Amino acid sequence: MTLDKVVMTKGGNCDYGVAIIGGGPAGSTAGTLLKRYNPDLQVVILEREIFPRDHIGESLLPPISPILQEMGCWDKIEAADFPVKLGATYRWGKSPELWDFDFFPVVQFKDEPRPAKYAGQRLATAFQVDRSIYDKILLNHAEECGCVVRQGTKVAKVHKVGDRVTALELADGEAVVARHYIDASGNSGILRRAMNVECDYHPALKNIAIWDYWQNAEWAVKIGVGGTRIQVRTVPFGWIWFIPMGPTRTSVGLVVPADYYAKSGMRPAELYLHALKQEPTLASLLENATCEDNLKTTKDWSFLASRHAGENWFLIGECAGFADPILSAGVTMAHIAGQQVAYTINEIEHGGDDNWLKEQFELRQSQRINTHIRFGDYWYTANAQLKDLKEFTSGLARSSGLELTPDKAWDWISRGGFIDEELRIGIGGFGLASIKESHYYLTDIAFDSILEKCNVFRLNLSGASTKERASYINGRVGKTKCYQRDGKVLPIRGVFELLVGILEHESKLRNIVDVINYCAQQNTNNPDFMRNVLPQITQGLEAMVRDGWVEGSYDPAEPLAKVSSGFVGFHPNTDATAGGRT
C-alpha cells in the first residue's frame, strides 16, 4: 500500500494496534503495560535517539515504584545500583537553615543488602537515577515484553484527516499505520504540534536549566546501604540541584528565570560556575570530582496542553504539559500518564465507551499537571532566599492570584481541594499533614487541628451531584461514584467510602472511633485495608472537613481526641557535620 493510499484510508488493516512516538519513561510504560494486559495487541515504539542517551529528570518519587513493579521491572532498576532516595535536603523558604523532607524516617531505615526486594521499607522509597541507564532498562524491558522497538527512527511527518491520524511517515519515507497513536516525544511534541493543539504557558514561570555531570563527587549524606537525599540549594538568583545517580556519577544543575539569564550578560557556563561558588557546601562535595564538561541547557517553561486526546491519539509525558522541576514530579507524571493511557486503550479495545474514557483521561492529566504547576508557584513565591528575584516572585504571585499572608496563602492552597479521584490527600505530591508542617520552612500559615477542636462530625452532601469517575485498576478502567460540589470531589472508594458509611449513621467522635476500631479488628488479615485505608483515616476525615463534605462542631458533653498525624516528613536537617556530611 502506498503512502497516499494509507493517508486516505479511514478504516482497513493496520500494521499495529498502537504506535508510540518516543521511548522515554512515558512511552516505555505505556508499551509495557499495553502488552502486559493485552498480549495480542501489536505495539511499536518509535524512538528518534539510540539509547543510552543522557536526560535530566533524575530524581524520582515513591509513586513510581509500584508502577515499576506492575511493569515487572522494579528488580531490574534495583539491580542497576541507583541510590535509594529517602527524600531531599533543602535550603529554601523563609530561613537560610537546612531542612529535610523524608519519605521514610531515616532513623528507622535499616541496613539491608542490595539488590533488595520491593517490600518493607522499600515500599516508601524512590530512586535517583542516571537516565541514560534507567531509560535504556525501561525501553529494553518494553521490547522483552513484546513491543517492537525501533531506535534511531525519526517521525518526519504526521498524516491526518480531520482529527484522525492516518499514518506516521518516517524519515526514510516508510509509513507506520495503527489504530491508536500515542505522543510520548517529550518537548518535541510531534503529534501535539501536528494536530494543532494549543498550549497554555504560565505567564510568569519561565525558567531555564543549565547542568553538567560530575564523576566521583562526594555524597552529602549516606543513609544505610546506598541511601541518600538529593540536595536543593537556593542561591540569590535561582536554585541548584545535586543528585547522585550512581556510585560515581552526579548530576548538578542550576535553574534560573529566563529573564534573569538574559539580563545577567553571562554565558551558561559562566552563570553555572558563578552559582556553584555561591554554595560552598556543594562546591566542597565537588572538590575532588571531575566535570564531564558537557554542559547542557533547556527551557523549563511550565505549560499545559489544551487537549490530551483526539479521535485516535493521545498525549502523555512532557508533550502534554510541564511543571517546574522543583517538586521532582516530571518522571512521576510521565509514568502515571503512561499507565493510564495503556489502561484507557485497553478498555477501548475491550469495547469501552471511547468518549467517556478519553474525557476521564484528559481530566486526570489536566488536574495532575495543573496541581503541580500551582503548588510550584507557591514554593517559588514563598522562598525569601531568592533575594535577587523579588520582582520575579512578586510577579509570579500576582499572575497566580496568590497572596502570601498566612490566611490568604492557606485559602489559595485549599481552593483546589485536598481530595482527588486517585485517593490522594494533599497537594502536589505532599500529604495534608506535610502541607500543614511546611509552614515552619515556607510561610507562616496557621494550621489549627480541626480534629482536636471538634468532637461531632456530620456528613454534608447537600447540593452535591454524583458522577462516575474513572478508576484505573489492574489494566482496566472501572467506574467509581463520586460526589461533586463547588469544584471539589469526593470519591466513594477506599478510606472515603469507609468514612461516608460511618458518618451516615454516627456523628459523635467517640462512636466514630469505636466503629473504626471494630473495622480494624475485622480486617486484620486484609493487607489493603491495613496498609491503604486505616493509616489514612485521620487525614481523610480532616480533608473531608476542609473540603466541606463534613461539618465539625464541639459538644462540651463529649470528649475530644488527641490526634497524631504519624510520620510527616518535614524536619530540620540533622546530618552529623556542618556540611551535611556523615
Image (spheres, rainbow, N blue to C red):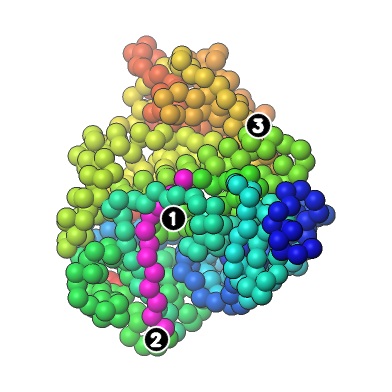
- In reply to whether residue 129 is colored magenta, the answer given is no
Question: Which residue matches tag 2?
Answer: 293
Q: Amino acid at mark 3?
A: Lys
Label 2 neighbour load within 10 Å: few <14, some 14-19, many 20+: few
Q: Amino acid at mark 2?
A: Asp
Q: Is residue 154 above or below residue 495?
A: below
Q: Earlier in the sequence, mark 2 or mark 3?
A: 2
Location of the C terminus by quadrant is bottom left
**Which residue is located at x 60 percent, y 47 percent?**
162
**Which residue is located at x 17 percent, y 63 percent?**
388
Query: Which stretch appears magenta?
Result: 293-306
Determine the CA span between mark 1 and mark 3: 28 Å
Question: Which residue matches tag 1?
Answer: 322
Give the number of marks: 3
| SS at badge 2 | loop
**Which residue is located at x 63 percent, y 73 percent?**
171
Q: Is residue 459 visible?
A: no
Label 3 neighbour load within 10 Å: few <14, some 14-19, many 20+: few
Residue 433 at x, y = what percent? 40, 41
| SS at badge 1 | strand
Q: Is residue 183 visible?
A: yes
Q: Quadrant of residue 244?
A: bottom left
Q: Is residue 112 above or below residue 436?
A: below
Tell me the chief SS of the magenta region. strand
Question: Which residue matches tag 3?
Answer: 479
Residue 525 at x, y = what percent? 70, 38
Determine the CA span between mark 1 and mark 2: 27 Å
